[in-house]
Amino acid sequence: MSLVPIYRPRPSPLHAAGAGSTTALCVSLALVCALYDHPVVVVAVIAAVAGAGLAAGVGSEIASAARLSVPLALLVTVINPLVYAEGNTLLIRGGSVLGHRFDITLEALAAGGLAGLRVAAFVMPFALFAACVDPDELLRSLRRVSYRSALTAALATRLVPVLARDATRMGDAARCRPHPPGRLAVARAALSGSLERAVDVAAALEVRGYSAGRRAARVRRSPSRHDVRVLAAAATVACAAVAGKLASAGSVEAYPRLEVGLGPAELTLSALLLLAAALPFAGRSARLGVARA
Amino acid sequence: MPEPVVSATGFNYRYPEAEGPALRELDLDLAEGSFTVLAGSSGSGKSTLLRALCGLVPHFHGGDASGELTVGGLSVREHGPAELAAVCGTVFQDPEAQVVMGGVRSELALALEHRGEPAAAVARAVEEVALAMGVAHLLDRRTETLSGGELQRVAIAAALVGRPALLLLDEPTSQLDPVAGDELIWLLRRLNEEWGTAVVLAEHRLERCLPAADRVVAIERGAVACDAPPADFLAWAAAGGGALATPVARMFSLAGLGPVPATVKEARESLRGAGLAEVGAPAAEPSPEPSASRLPWRRERRGAAALKARDLWLEIEDGPRVLAGVDLRFEPGEKVALMGRNGAGKSTLLRLFKGLQQPTRGRLERAGGVALLLQNPGDYLVHDHAAEEAGEPALAAAGLAGRGQAHPRDLSGGERQRLALEVVLSGGPCAAVLLDEPTRGMGRPDKDALAERIGDLAAHGAAVVVATHDTEFAATFADRVVLMGPGTVIADGQPAQVLAGGWHFSTDVARTLSGAGGALTPAQGARLLARELVG
């Protein structure tokens, strides 16, 4: 299992929908993480992504990405109270270094926890995107807008497992040496090898006319029933998030005292997120459509 | 006379910061629809010539070019790779590095999309090329799920999708097993005959591709040394010491027979013509079944084994059975070729012996240290200078004395391989030395040097086990061949017993002589023919 989720075709509405539609859903879920730090809303995003991932058959990929985000979230949680000394509830009185007091407050710790949770939540929609969106189709959709950027993204997706295999091989070779080189030397060689691979890929692109720079022909595609459902879910999430923000839902004040507002607005928004994420999978027609695809 | 698709007149090229030119005073005309093989030792300039034909030289690599080289009427000095892509498709050595997209269909469409072709035209071209190249069943597969052979076919289809007049291939079979390699060569011949696509193919294993070629261009130090039909090229190569000659051509040359044949079929006909029909005729009695002759000569030698595997199993959880009850014993000083098709378990067995993986069942015994050289020698070389990888004695043993300041990546494939071998041997004497596919992409001089080194190691008491697809190399160095089926040993014996009567696992000399006298190498075949001629 790769650390970074990799797209593989599967019979699910998220895979059957166009790359643009599924990307829109993932972006709308990421938008919620960008707009809110309310724990209930953020947990709702995590649950929505996890549910959609499970229903789409990419649960293990999402779980793997979630595991990857845990150290980052913990790091944020730990660093925040060391950097911010605000808050009324003092937990540990630290010393003073270069004029900066290192007091640990409950509020700073809680704010760190919320920020860490938000970081973890941010990873989730991107994991869903990487696992469910065909990078080739995305490249095709974006070709007329920003071809080179889209190609870079598609290439990165393709090369990640190749480079991971290269690094594993080099690790094995290092174990075969009577005096194994340091990790830094192996990492440097792996990096240098990846640059060589990049040059090879660039040469392969050149001989296939990459620099001809012709504008790609437009490809028209009628939206499928999966597109409609996934886009409806994306629109629901985005509208609910923006509307909730305009209505000042999900307010969190960390300092001087931690205040997390929890009312009908937050609960409704969270429920809407969960329902919207389930929308692409709802009903018999969604499953039948996938079976035919 | 067809129009030349490639025309070179006094073409020279020097890489940036290189001391000498990589291509010198090149004069060459390649006709439309021809099938040309580029021959030459490592570093002779074959790959540079191919890179010049597709425009990467000088536009991608930089450097200085002079003289004239046109491809499909376009001068490579004035037109870059993108313009030349309309007239020539290019396929490189490593299929992993040239496949760009995640899906096969997108991969095939890429070149036409770069040209801005309408979607309907792209879809039709993809469908047609996929059917023509036999990859239609792969169209909806992800590229990372393809085998090496499938990936190389997809790369060729992607190069052909725009129907170029010329297809350039740089050692496309070097990463493939022999079955996939042979299939690829015949696929190229078919597209050359049916579509009229001119093919220029650089290869080390000429015996594999000469039967398909119309013409061979030998490159030496960047210049054309020979430009002739295969039979004339082989006569030239045999007269010049045989470094580029095929095994059968060398056998004929050593036996003083002529003309030098280009294929096994021609060789048999030639033997019949020389009154040696019974040598080349199918043996009246087939060679003994290798598995039935389980080496009584070896059973007598029962000292301490260098390596021993007893009832060795490796079963991947939720996956296939890789090894199933392997019993093997390698004696000190033995030189063993471990053969078998891809997936038979050769590499896995070597990794288990080294301890990189653990068996799920069975016992392994090692009499001492085990050195393992994995398939890609470049993986062992992690420093900026060769001298940092191994000491001066090791550099000298690798034939790199005085080149300690060279960057390992600037060494040739054969030099890298020798250096990596010395790196794994630098821990002192080993009970066993294991080499995994060490001859991939190697020319004959490098293989001869490796065979000599293997002999040295065995003479010092190490058991040397080489996993290889290269039957010619196995016949040269080994005194025992172990043939593996999927996860099991299916034959184990002296090379003549295992390889002389084989169909696929056999040498060209043995095929020509139908296994007569157990001759496998050109020298053995020539001795047999000489005896027959005298008799």
Image (tube, rainbow, N blue to C red):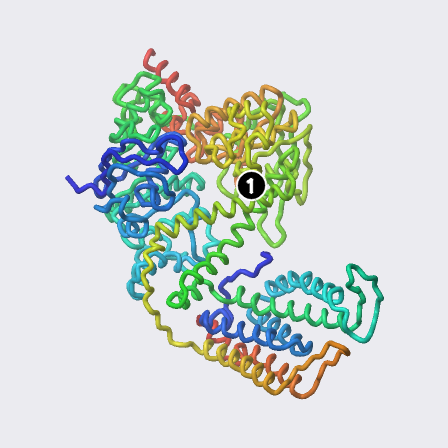
Q: Identify the residue at horizontal 35%, vertical 14% (top origin).
A: B530
Where is residue A90 shown, x and y percent of the image? 83, 71
SS for dot 1: loop
Q: Identify the residue at horizontal 66%, vertical 84% (top origin).
A: A267
Q: Which of A30 and B179 is in front in this view?
A: A30
**B530 above or below B64?**
above
- Name, please, the residue furthest toward the top: B534
- Name, please, the residue furthest toward the front: A99
**B178 above or below B272?**
below
Question: The C terminus of chain B appears in which quarter of the rendering?
Answer: top left
**B256 above or below B434?**
above
Where is residue B147 shown, x and y percent of the image? 46, 49
Residue at image mark 1: B345
Toward which corner of the image does residue A50 lie, by quadrant? bottom right
Q: Is residue B324 visible?
A: no
Q: How many residues crowd around disc 1 within 10 Å: few (fewer than 14), some, or many (20 or more)?
A: many
> In screen coordinates, is B410 left or right of A59?
left
Q: Identify the residue at horizontal 59%, vertical 36% (top origin).
A: B350
> In screen coordinates, is B424 left or right of A19?
right
Total number of numbered discs in the rendering: 1
* Chain under callout 1: B
Where is residue A205 shown, x and y percent of the image? 39, 52
**Which amino acid is tagged 1?**
Gly
> In screen coordinates, is B300 left or right of A229?
right
Question: The N terminus of chain B appears in which quarter of the rendering?
Answer: top left
- Name, please, the residue furthest toward the left: B1
Where is residue B451 shown, x and y percent of the image? 50, 24
Q: Can residue B113 be seen in this view?
A: yes
